[in-house]
Structure formats: C-alpha cells, structure tokens
Image (cartoon, grey):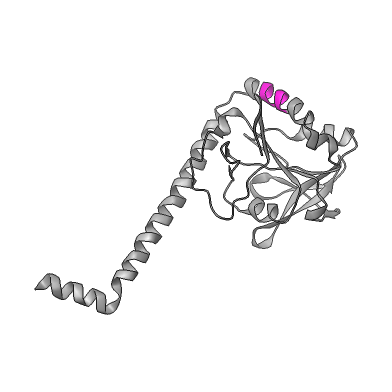
Amino acid sequence: PYTTLFRSRLEDCNLLSLLAFFIYLNVTMGDKMNKNIFRQTQIKRLNQIDITSKRAKEALILESFFDQHEVKNARKLAITMSHGFELDTAPIIQRLIENGKCVYVPRTLPERQMEFVEYNLNTPMQPKFQGILEPVGGNVVRPEALDLIIVPGLAYEVSNGYRLGFGGGYYDRYLKKTPASKIVLAFSEQIYSDPQWDVEPFDVPLEKIITEEGVQFER
C-alpha cells in the first residue's frame, strides 16, 4: 500500500519528470567535471616535456607548417601569442612577417568574444588574463577576411579533427564566423586516436593537425 501511494503521489506531482531532469543535470555536471580534470591532466603532461625535447619538437613542427600549401597560399593569418607549456609561436610569427604575410593576434572582448588585430614587431602589447599578451589598439581584421587561423588547444583527436580547448569558448565562437583554413600545431603528447572528452554540438572540427611527426589529420 505504501509503495502504491508513493508512486501515485509521484505521478500526481509529476516528480518523475523532475527526477529525470536532476539525473540529467548530475550527468551533465559530471561530464563537465571530467572534462576539466582531463584538462588539468593534459596540462601536467605538457609541463613534463623537458625544454630540450620541446625545442626539438617545435623546430620540426615549424618546418612542416611552412611546407603546407595553406600557409604558402595564405596572405592573412591569425595566430595566438603562446605562453608557458604551449608550443612557442614567436619564431613562427617572426618568419611569417619576414615572408611578407599579414599576421593577426587575438584580443579578448566581453562576453567571451574575441577579435584579431594586425601585429608587427612594433605593436604595443599588454598582459591580460594569466599574463597572456594582447595588442593595444591596432587594426582589427574581419573574420571573413582571414585565409588561415592557427587554433590553440590542449588535446586533439584524429578521427574527426576535434579539439579540447581551455574552456573559455572564445575560439569556438570565433571559428564559426570565419571561412579560414583551421590548422593545429601540436606536440604528439596532445594527440589521441579518438575523443577522450565529450564533443559538444558547438565544437568546430579542424582541417589539419600537425605534430613533430608530420601531418596527423587532414580533412
């Protein structure tokens, strides 16, 4: 009798639907927590690469990058200002400029938006979140005018070309706005055969992934 009464009241109050919602919410929050844990694990993994190995990997990646037809044919390229454990983009930026390319670097905006600003070696920069340098003033390029964008991240999978970013969502929002070729430069420690994280509907797949071992994914 107690079970029947309890079930009846649940149905009358529509609590089963509410319970299902909370189960869904808990699973969703759990997935997000797992993704954040994976990010922290990946950061630790990248920090464990010794400086000698890191420099050797970067040199190989740089040469492979400049061999790509997308790079040779591009006139306007967007690239991040790296820091810490990330692949050092400074030599790439310098060589792009020496090759006569128009280089643009990111600047964050409110509501997790971003824009890319024209950059040269005399561009004034200031540290922002976590000490990442961003340009002060300068000419902003329209997303549809870019030819190529080098997309940063923590991990990449080579079955469909998805990435795991840092969790801010800046690049996810921007990538939807630009037809530019989307290329990744990564260490082999960042590559997985399939996603080790949940791929979200808003994730934008990449077109090419390059490591010190060459092209690992091409759409």
Membership of 209 in magenta stretch: no
Q: Position of residue 15 (x, y in %)?
A: 29, 72
Spot the residue most to the right: 100
Q: Nearer the viewer, residue 23 or 159?
A: 159
* Rendered image quadrant of residue 147: top right
Q: Position of residue 153 (x, y in %)?
A: 62, 41
Q: Nearer the viewer, residue 117 or 187?
A: 187
Residue ID at (51%, 37%): 194
Residue ID at (44%, 50%): 33
Magenta region: 55-61
- Please tell me whether residue 183 is drawn above or below residue 16 in the rendered image: above
- Please tell me whether residue 177 is drawn above or below residue 16 in the rendered image: above
- Please tell me whether residue 96 is drawn above or below residue 24 in the rendered image: above
Residue ID at (40%, 61%): 25
Q: Specify the quadrant that holds the C terminus.
A: top right
Left or right: 120 as drawn, with respect to 20 = right
Spot the residue most to the front: 219
Membership of 60 in magenta stretch: yes
Q: Position of residue 91 (x, y in %)?
A: 78, 31
Q: Nearer the viewer, residue 176 or 45?
A: 176
Q: Position of residue 12 (x, y in %)?
A: 25, 79
Q: Is the stretch drawn in magenta largely helix, strand or loop?
A: helix
